[in-house]
Amino acid sequence: MCVSPWSNTYDPPLDDGAMPSDRLRKLEIDANEAFDQYREMYFEGGVSSVYLWDLEHGFAGVILIKKAGDGSKKIKGCWDSIHVVEVQEKSSGRSAHYKLTSTVMLWLQTNKSGSGTMNLGGSLTRQIESDSNVNEANPHIANIGKLVEDMENKIRNTLNEIYFGKTKDIVNGLRSVQSLTEQRQQADLRNDLAKALQKRQAKGSDI
């Protein structure tokens, strides 16, 4: 059973299913349109959904983004973003406290004649809290969107450093790009340069 964030209906139908308030439903529609544009801008495809529900002093929601690679470049993969946001609105209505918990799951598979088949997968979860003004220039959607955008960029960079950087180190440790002969020649050259530098320093100290 699921509920569509676009039509606000359950499939299959459910008479007593939880529904957002009218105010929040309008915000949910606007959020789906906004993150649909965000998804197209950053992912150039995929699917996205935003679900919101009422809290006693605000609201909460989840933003889901999924992009799967089709393997056209001999690389298959899937990126899943799960952003859970909790918004506590201040009594004045002019500011709010945002708490964002983001999880990104990434899976990649390459199949090339030169390197063979390699699978790589991992996930990362991060959390951030922020207070922001709420007005016409800075509505809830804009505030949440900025948090999600910044978080995804940070997670992407971290995944790139941790997983891809570590994989490169492991592969280089198993097999060098250079032949052993080239490595020995470079090591001998470094030793010769070091010895020559030491001799020059010794001569300079004798003067």
Image (cartoon, grey):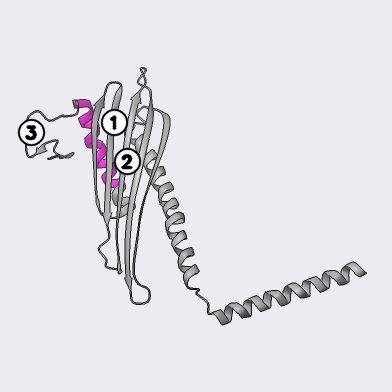
Among numbered discs 3 and 1, the one appearing first in the sequence: 3
Name which quarter of the figure residue 6 lies in.
top left
Among numbered discs 3 and 2, the one appearing first in the sequence: 3
Secondary element under disc 2, as helix, strand or loop, is strand
- Dot 3, how many residues are within 10 Å of its Cα: few (below 14), some (14-19), or many (20+)? few
| Residue with the most extreme right position | 207
Give the residue drawn at x 25%, y 36%: 30
121 w.r.t. 59: above or below: below
Name which quarter of the figure residue 22 lies in.
top left
- Is 23 colored magenta in this rendering? yes
36 w.r.t. 10: above or below: below
| Residue 101 placement (x, y as % from top left) | 36, 38
| Residue 64 placement (x, y as % from top left) | 27, 44
Q: Which residue is tagged 1?
A: 60
Q: Which residue is tagged 3?
A: 14
- Say which amino acid is labelled 1: Ala
Q: Is residue 179 left or right of 195 when viewed as pictured?
A: left
- Is 127 colored magenta in this rendering? no
- Say which amino acid is labelled 2: His
| Residue 163 placement (x, y as % from top left) | 42, 57
Residue span colored magenta = 22-37
| Residue 23 placement (x, y as % from top left) | 22, 26
- Say which amino acid is labelled 3: Leu
Q: Which residue is tagged 2?
A: 83
Looking at the image, do the residues carrying marks 3 and 2 touch, with CB atoms under 8 Å apart? no
